Image (tube, grey):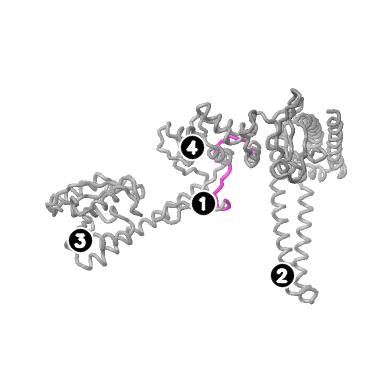
Amino acid sequence: MFKNRACMYLRLSKDDGVNEESNSITNQREIVKSYARKNEIELVKEYIDDGYSGLNFDRPEFKEMIEEISKEERIFDTIIVKDLSRFSRDYIGSGRYIQRIFPEIGIRFISINDNYDSQNADSNDTHLILPIRNFINDSYCRIISNSVKSSQKIKREQGQYIGSFAPYGYKKSEENKNKLIIDENVREIVKSIFDMKLLGYSSKAIGDELNRLGVDSPKVYKQRQGLKYLGGFKTTKGGNWSAHAINRIIQNEVYLGKMQQGKSVTISYKNRKQVEREKSDWIVVENTHEAIISQEIFQIANVMLKRDLNTSKYENEKSCLFRGMLFCKDCGSPLVRRTVNLKRKTTVYYICSKYNKQKACSRHSVKEEVIEKILLEILKRYILFNKKLYEKVKNIDFSKNIEDTQILLLQREKEMAERLLSDLYIDLEENIISKEEYQIFRKNYLQQVSKLEENIRHQEEKRKLVQKNMEEKKQWIIDIKKYGQLTKLDRLSIVLLIEKILVGESKEMEVIFNHKEELNLITNILCHEKEIDKTEMPQMIQLQENEIANISRELKTVEKGA
């Protein structure tokens, strides 16, 4: 060990302010060199942590310095820093090193701007003044951290994007770094991911297809743009895209033009570990940037995502017309596709997956060609039904506030529950009910009122949305012209019009359509506006159900003749 041989430790982070010249690495180095020359100290080593916070000691060069002084034959016995804040802003950790560890191993510590030299310091310097200065440095970090968090919260609430990297499919505007604009280079990739999900691809199959086409994953794409992006997407061995990356894109509402931020928070200004927040605590702002995906496509893609099946056994999985759409009417399990080759003829059946795996439920076997015939006829009648309904609706002025009979019914039900709730206390006072019964009834009525209030809010939001679409966009719930000439089933028509299809043991089919809430709302509006009689609409709906029943009966005839 050599006396009066020293190392300099230099540190700078974003928290210190990059534009502060006094804290720059160059400035720190010159101050330390000047001090060493004046005091005849030889500098033999330089440790620099550029871009690392002083809130903790998880810094590569700092660790290397500590490792060096722990050796029996070290090359220096003195550490020099510009000031205590360069060494650390953690006052407890700083005190442990300066007051205990360094003296025990014979290391001299010098903080130039604090006029502190452990070799000449008295007990007041070491045990009183030094801890106070460390505490001030620590408090500075806490104040800066709170200030940054407050500023970020305001920006998030204003719909400004504050992430380091734009989500895949977008980039930061050159004029405003807090504004997202569409990255035209990958817009179509994002759209194709959603399209493939609607077409029945599993997330793994989508990733495999993108890998086959040589499409860069989000991480690779950003790195090719020259960004120092580490990424949160997992990659697969031998390929860039994974099912996890596909799922994250499909679930991200940023593609709707919606900003969702504040999904996680750091534990404290000293611990940078991120903790996930409840979705209700996220900061959400609508219409902050141009959408890539429509609300309808996004919603259906996410429904298909929840039904994502392992379809690796199927050679032709991409073209499967009914994947994720058929369910057992009795047990609710998905139907699985089975192919039978008999006498040079291939027949495709769908059977209950619960029966297939556990021999529970029952077979519910139905031919694919029969489903196609029934469903095509059902869709034709459904489109005709919408045409009739549209003729009734198009004359209504949706710019005015329109009452909804369903909302009125819910409000009356809520008022009744509130009256019963208020009468409970009278019943208790008159000994009609006991205290225990009072508590039970009160809890039940409060829950009922709360649920009704939620239903009313939901119904009002739906009403406003339908009114807005009908008034501003002048469009019907479904694109009638698009489906008017439907002569053959295709996957997109099925998933855009239908939520799911239930198949019974007797091969009867129940089709649950998308937009059923909107159609019910339109029914209520028509009733209130006296465009139809209260009994007319149920008859129209019943007519649809009767027609579906007729098709089911036709199915039995087809099956018998098959």
Q: CA distance from mark 1 to mark 4?
A: 22 Å
Secondary structure type for disc 2: helix
Q: Name above or below for residue 76 compared with residue 219.
A: below
Q: Which residue is mark 3?
A: 118
Q: Nearer the viewer, residue 33 or 224?
A: 224
Q: Name above or below for residue 118 compared with residue 277.
A: below
First-in-chain label (2 vs 3) = 3
Secondary structure type for disc 1: strand
Q: Which residue is mark 4?
A: 235
What is the x, y in percent for residue 239?
49, 32
**In the rendered structure, which amino acid carries the disc numbered 2?**
Gln
Q: For marks 1 and 4, give the one nearer the viewer.
A: 4
Contact? badges 3 and 4 (CB < 8 Å): no
At horizontal 77% and vertical 45% (from top left) the residue drawn is 330
Secondary structure type for disc 3: loop
Q: CA distance from mark 2 to mark 3?
A: 70 Å
Q: Which mark is residue 508?
A: none
Q: CA distance from mark 3 to mark 4?
A: 51 Å
Q: Which residue is mark 2?
A: 439
At horizontal 32% and vertical 58% (from top left) the residue drawn is 137
First-in-chain label (3 vs 4) = 3
What is the x, y in percent for residue 354?
71, 43
The answer to which quarter of the image holds residue 465 is top right
The answer to which quarter of the image holds residue 25 is top left
Q: Which residue is mark 1?
A: 276
First-in-chain label (2 vs 1) = 1
Identify the magenta region: 279-295
At horizontal 27% and vertical 59% (from top left) the residue drawn is 97
Q: CA distance from mark 2 to mark 4?
A: 55 Å
Q: Nearer the viewer, residue 97 or 207?
A: 207
**In the rendered structure, which amino acid carries the disc numbered 1?**
Glu
